[in-house]
Amino acid sequence: MSDLGFSFSLSQLWQIAGGQLILIFASLILIFVDLWLTTDEESDHVATMGWLTALSFLVALWYLVHREWPLHEVVLAGVFSAEKFSVFVSAVVLLAGVFASLLSIGYMRNNRMFRGEYFVLLLFAVYGTIAMLQAVDLLMIFIALEVMSLSVYSLAAFLKDSRKSQEGALKYFLLGCFGSAFFLFGLALTYGLTGTVNITKIAQILSVGPFKHPVVLVALAMLMAGLFFKMSLVPFHMWAPDVYEGSPSIITAYMATAVKAGAFGVFLKLMSVAFTPILSLSGQPDFQSTINLGMLAVYWKPVLWWLALLTMFVGNLVAVSQQNVKRMLAYSSIAHAGYMSLGLLAANSEGRMAVLFYLVVYTIMNFGAFGVLFLIDGKEGKAQTLEDYRGLGYRYPTLSFLMSLFLLSMAGLPPTAGFIGKFYLFAAAIKQGYFVLAALGVMTCVIASYYYLRVVWKFYMEEPAREVVAGNISFVTMGVLICLALGVMYFGILPAGLVHIANVAQQSLAMVF
Amino acid sequence: MEGYIFLIPLLPLIGFLINGLFGQKIGKWMITYIGCSSIGLAFLTSVLIVYHMLCLPVGERQFTQVLWHWITVGNLHIDLAFMLDPLSAVMILVVTGVSFVIHIYSKGYMAHDESYWRYYAYLNMFVFFMTVLILGANYVVMFVGWEGVGLASYLLIGFWYKENLIADAGKKAFIVNRVGDFGFLLGMFLIFVTFGSLSYTELFPKVLHMYEHGLLAMNSPVMIAICLLLFVGATGKSAQIPLYVWLPDAMAGPTPVSALIHAATMVTAGVYMVARTNILYTLAPTALLVMSLMSAATAFIAATIGVLQYDIKRVLAYSTVSQLGYMFIGVSVLAYSAGIFHLMSHAFFKACLFLCAGAVMHAMRGDLDMRDMGGLAKKMPITYVTMLFASLAISGIPPFSGFFSKDEVLGKAFMFPYYPVVGKIVWFIGLAAAGITAFYMFRLMFMTFHGEFRGTEEEARHVHEMPFSMTGPLMVLAFLSLVGGWVGIPEVMNSLFPFHVTNLFENFLDPVFEHSHEIVAGFVTIPHYSSTVEWILMSSSVAVGIGGICLAYYIYICHPDTLPQKLAHTFALHYKLIYNKYYIDEIYYHVVVLPFYFLSTFCWKVIDAFLIDGVGVNGQAWWVQRGSRAVGLVQNGYVQTYGAFMLLGLVMMLWFFIF
Amino acid sequence: MMSGFGTIAMYLAMSVIGVGAMFLMSRALGPFRPTPTKATTYECGVPLLAAGHNRYSIKYYLVAVLFLIFDIETVLIYPLGVRYSSMAHNSWALFFEIFIFVAILLAGLVYAIKRGAIDWD
């Protein structure tokens, strides 16, 4: 491949894309483990698969943190990079994978849904997200995006007997094709214009070439729309409530956190490397002129301004009138995407840091909330409405307490992590001068606290409407939930460490090129 | 050793968590064991650390331990840090020690309560917050403890919350304390705004430095404001005029709680705070003037109210208010160590008195009215003797601890350097209050333990001595009431002893207060009185104490049936006034509570219910609901609509980009 | 910014308007009298036998999906075969690479077969 102008060796491949390789091998092995593993109890089979999956994620996570985080040479053959930024977001995704696989064991037992390939699909989904994050090549980003999406589509359809699940998955698939088509079209236009798919080269060529050409803008709009779909920003959000409501709860949590984390990560990377690059740190003269492209911000920032505003408002407003808690959380996750896009909009180092921080926090609290949700549910869809939650505070004190904690964190009340996360996001937006947007955003937070606190109110202040029997609460599930709760409290009280790491991570974006 | 300071609050916290979370499951024996041993270990830790401190030279007796950086906003840096210096050493020993004794006493006292675990959990929580209050190395940590003990106090006063009256007493304590806390907070903010720091180790040297370099005048308005605002906080927590009203009602809680929180420890937090802030107070003489007069008034008025109460615990409550007045006299006449000294001896004898009252109450099956008692001395000899010790201590009879501490406070008041005349007035009021104190204490003793039993037959049969877990603590505290004062024997008494005595206590605390003394010495000439004057002061207070006891003996032993009524009849107006506690509660009700009630009704009905809830909140909520439904309509479930919206979004984006 | 896209936009607009106009005009000018016979699907004058939407056997899709595996294999191996001689300096590495690729696809095939993808009954 020397004619492409990149050097390539297996050791470098292992060094930079080791996490991905580990996941691919793990999934290939697990496919066959699933086939040939015979246990007396089906639930043991699922538990084994779940633990093995979690273990693979942990190994990959270990590799990422210990081997890829300290790397200096970060670009592999112009396809993958392992700078701290993508390592950070990948770690978030892997963490989400660990939570998802461990919680899924309990979920599958409660729903009597014993399917081993669920975990393999989860592995592929995580692999796709990580590959997408590490890619510095638009084509690779697209392929990885599709690997991720296809796996998630099938995961969303996993409740075979549920019409909602089938309907949601089909909608997701159809609209997902739409979104992918946007992205692909943008990719094609970019390639046509610059003759390359490598995002660093794109920046280089655009900056000296005619970057004011309307085709650049069309390409940018298309790429953005494709990613906005995955980030579920209004008006590309319409699939989200239906899909989130229909999918298995754990998969919903995974989609709302890891898939979004992937999309946000790619968006940040794409923007800060290719289209409105930050100042390059590599010192190569080729990249010095890319700062010219900063003027593209004049185009995309106002658009994102409006989308962020719409997203925050629509997400929070519609959540208010939802009676189904799962659907309410789906809308709330749209709203959270709106908050995070404040950080994208600020596009300064604080903003990027805030987005990274919020991704971690959001992953933790969202998994927590969905983890409790599926436990109270018992079997998917049995007790999801607000009516079912009445008076549960006395019947299930631990579950109710945990749920309240996670919801309070989502509402952004101190001393939980949600508060700190929102604080940094809004602070970044204000620092960049978006006062009106920040003020309106805080207003939507007030609306949000209404529907979060309503759940807490139902728990403790009302008499039960009917008998609700929570599902079996296994040791693992409880352990994960307690870890999540501790995480919410820890990052709320001592955020400094994570802030520092996120800051280092966002600085490393300048090392890609 | 400073690395272990965190253990002192941590151990009670662990006790609280275990008892609070698992108390219902682990059984009484375990609850007691955990509750007592956590405090016992905290006491042991304190003793070891203080012993280590004593081994060090005087200049190095200050330990700080920073656990972590807590809040960093702008130039406000607050660490979660603990500091142990001689002042907090004295406090921590008193608090953990007395708490330990009272925890053991509670085992017997609360044995039959159904919420036993809750009681121990709260008590451990209280000790945790109290130690945080004392050890905190800045005002914010102190405030955390300050609020925390308030919470614990509220929970424990309302411990038997099923009765309305008791729950109300809890609320009253909490609300009155909020008023004080407000002052404390404002004072804290003002300190930060003025000096830019809230940490003791930064603030005090800075203030001193500013004063020495002429950047800060003596008696500057901002210092007076800070000191008075902090004092407002102290009047709330330490039950001084005008915020003392909650303390007598707080007696609704279990008696060991009254002993621990509302006599020995929590209520002295204000005194500790003032002593801690001594440099600031020394620089604000006007504030000290106000404080000394207020506290003298408190000492006197509360003592007079105590004279006519029949409820044992209420007598002791007013006595606590009055004694707290003495402590504040001490700290406000620049005799900070005297104030702390009285705090310590008061902790011993007042805790002892309350626990004895608890024993009597237990024996009387919850009856607290002295008119139903009498002659209990024969049936409860240990209780009687221990209570006698404590009463002698509070009356200031040598060689009991109260004598040394009260005498030092009064003596220092007489020599108040800033305002000598006011000092003498304060001394005189204090002296009178001391006489009244001796009178009402022995009125209590005589009515309870002497004479004939006046209760019912059934009660008489029930009266018995308490088990050892209750009398043991009594004996310990009685012993301490006797010897506790011997650490602070004034030097003027040297001639009485064959060996040389020094005021150990004052010397020990000296490093904390030396800068204040320097400031005073640099500002005014300290009046010097000969040892004869000191002897006269001392003997006059003893004489007044003995006089009070004799008067009580004359009235309640010699003529118990006739004289009290006759006196009440002769001085009907005074009697009524004092018996009704100067109508303070009623005055507060009409002057503060009622207008406030009307105002809040107005706020509730008109501003809140109509304007804010109706037009504002519900109006907004109505709009939000409407908006929610309107936007929700778009979400109609048809995938083609969804696709259309995506396309629309894209078109809008392109439109904006290109045109 | 009418430069590049102006003409295209003009073209698009014209075509949309033209087609739309024709539709509307035929609707506006022509008579519209539907009968059941007219409303049926036109099938070369022969009456309809069944609805157009037939259900296919799921196996059809399964075979199609399995076919994809081989299809993709060919798509990648063919260009490699063409370019192989020009990359002789690291031919073994390439060989193993393609070997791994085929192995992964084979794993998929084995999995599908073990799951019973081609068990017809």
Image (cartoon, coloured by chain):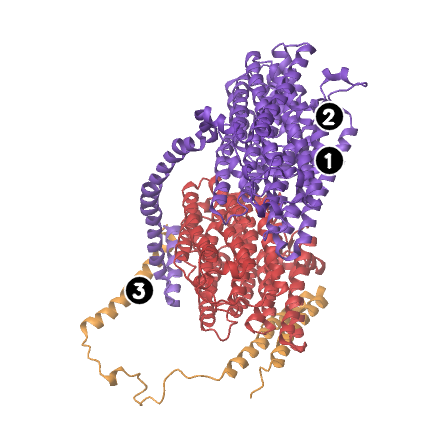
Chain colours: A red, B purple, C orange
Viewer-proximal residue among A164 and A394: A394
Circle 1: element type: helix
Q: Residue at x 55, y 68 (%)?
A: A471
The answer to which quarter of the image holds residue C70 is bottom right
Label 2 to label 1, Cα distance in Å? 29 Å
Q: State which tag comes first along the sequence, 2 or 1.
A: 1
Residue under the point 52% across and 28% down: B564
Q: Nearer the viewer, residue B300 or B508?
A: B300
Q: Which residue is mark 3?
A: C15
Both on one chain, marks 2 and 1? Answer: yes
From the image, state whether disc 2 or disc 1 is nearer to you.
2
Residue A204 visible in image: no
Left or right, A403 with respect to B4, comes to left
Q: Closer to the observer: label 3 or label 2?
A: 2
- Residue extending farthest to the right is B498
Rendered position, A486 above or below A125: above
Q: Same chain for the residues at labels 3 and 1, yes or no?
A: no
Q: Chain of mark 1?
A: B
| Residues at marks 3 and 2 on the same chain | no
Q: Which residue is mark 1?
A: B2
Tell me the subunit letter for badge 3. Answer: C
**Picture coordinates of residue A239 (x, y %)?**
43, 63
Q: Which residue type carries mark 1?
A: Glu
Q: Quadrant of residue A288?
A: top right
Q: Secondary structure at mark 2?
A: helix
Mark 2 = which residue?
Answer: B486
The amino acid on which the numbered mark 2 sits, given as a three-letter code, is Trp
Q: What type is the residue that disc 3 sits on?
A: Ser
| Vertical arrangement, residue A166 with respect to residue B421, above or below | below
For marks 3 and 2, give the CA distance.
109 Å
As measured in the structure, the alpha-carbon distance from the residue carrying label 3 to the one carrying label 1 is 86 Å
- 10 Å crowding of disc 1: few (<14), some (14-19), many (20+): some
